[in-house]
Image (tube, grey):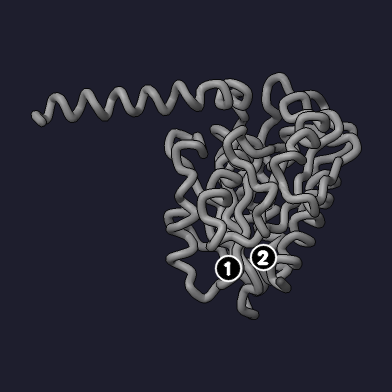
Amino acid sequence: MRPTRWRLVLLVAGVTLLLVGGGLVARWLLLPGPPLAEARAALASDDRVLVRRLAWWEFRPAVAAPRAGLVFYPGAFVDPVAYAPAARELAQRQFLVAVVPMPLGVALLGSERAMGVMAATPEVSRWAVGGHSLGGVAAAAFARRHPELVQGLVLWASYPNGPDDLSSQPIAVVSVFGELDPLTSPARARAAARQLPPETRFVEIAGGNHSQFGWYADQPRDVPARISRAEQQAQVIAATAELLERVAGS
């Protein structure tokens, strides 16, 4: 096959992929703002957490060995740095967290990137994957494709895509969503129960919205939260830490 023909095949394949994912991307393509100052401040290492910039952002307990790991996929077009405060807090609780940048800012185009994190971190034997919004969709797809690698799934304002049925998979799952979120409504998050294991824990944050799952300027079409970002983050982190405790202890 001539090079020009190969280029045509690759172009058609790429366009097809974008069209298939287009319906999902359209739901989350709402131009999130840049990370807030609190997020950038969380990138500094100290005596409790070591932060490294690899091909991803790694947050590691400074003293003890990680008890489990979380590979986290950002929401569509959200800067990975926006999740640094939550990742840092989880690292303080003795979990390793890797926040992974995505091709063109879309996790569906890089859903296999957790594989690289796991391969580069052999000292961690128990893993969860997760993500915010479209990142959670991609994480669920990874968990469905690689049940031998993943013991936990963390969904922040997200749910599995239609083909990704994990209902019979032996995996611990937590789904956290905001009461006021117009992008991933509580009804939509709960409707995913049929695609998730029966023991899935659903956590609704009263007064929470979509943007406050990270530390970035609020997205257009989101609604104002009735609680502070710090309050919403505390509940998100608590639910995620509980899931990671289950993964570490299982």
At horizontal 55% and vertical 44% (from top left) the residue drawn is 141
Q: Where residue 245 appears, x then y in whole percent?
A: 75, 67
Name which quarter of the figure residue 120 lies in: bottom left
Amino acid tagged 1: Leu
Residue found at the far left of this picture: 2
User: Does any portion of residue 44 appear in the rendered image?
Assistant: no
For mark 2, does the 10 Å Cα neighbourhood hold few (<14), some (14 to 19), or many (20 or more) residues? Answer: many
Name which quarter of the figure residue 66 lies in: bottom right
224 and 181: which one is in front? 181
Q: Earlier in the sequence, mark 2 or mark 1?
A: 1
Residue 222 position (above or below residue 215): above
Is label 2 in a helix, a strand or a loop?
helix
Q: Where residue 99 appears, x then y in whole percent?
A: 56, 52
136 and 168: which one is in front? 168
Q: Where residue 35 appears, x then y in whole percent?
A: 62, 39
At horizontal 72% and vertical 26% (from top left) the residue drawn is 183
Amino acid tagged 2: Ala
For mark 1, does the 10 Å Cα neighbourhood hold few (<14), some (14 to 19), or many (20 or more) residues? Answer: some
The residue that mark 1 highlights is 50
The residue that mark 2 highlights is 91
157 and 48: which one is in front? 157
Is label 1 in a helix, a strand or a loop?
strand
Check the picture and name the quadrant holding the N terminus: top left
At horizontal 72% and vertical 58% (from top left) the residue drawn is 172
Check the picture and name the quadrant holding the C terminus: bottom right
Q: Is residue 127 left or right of residue 158?
A: left
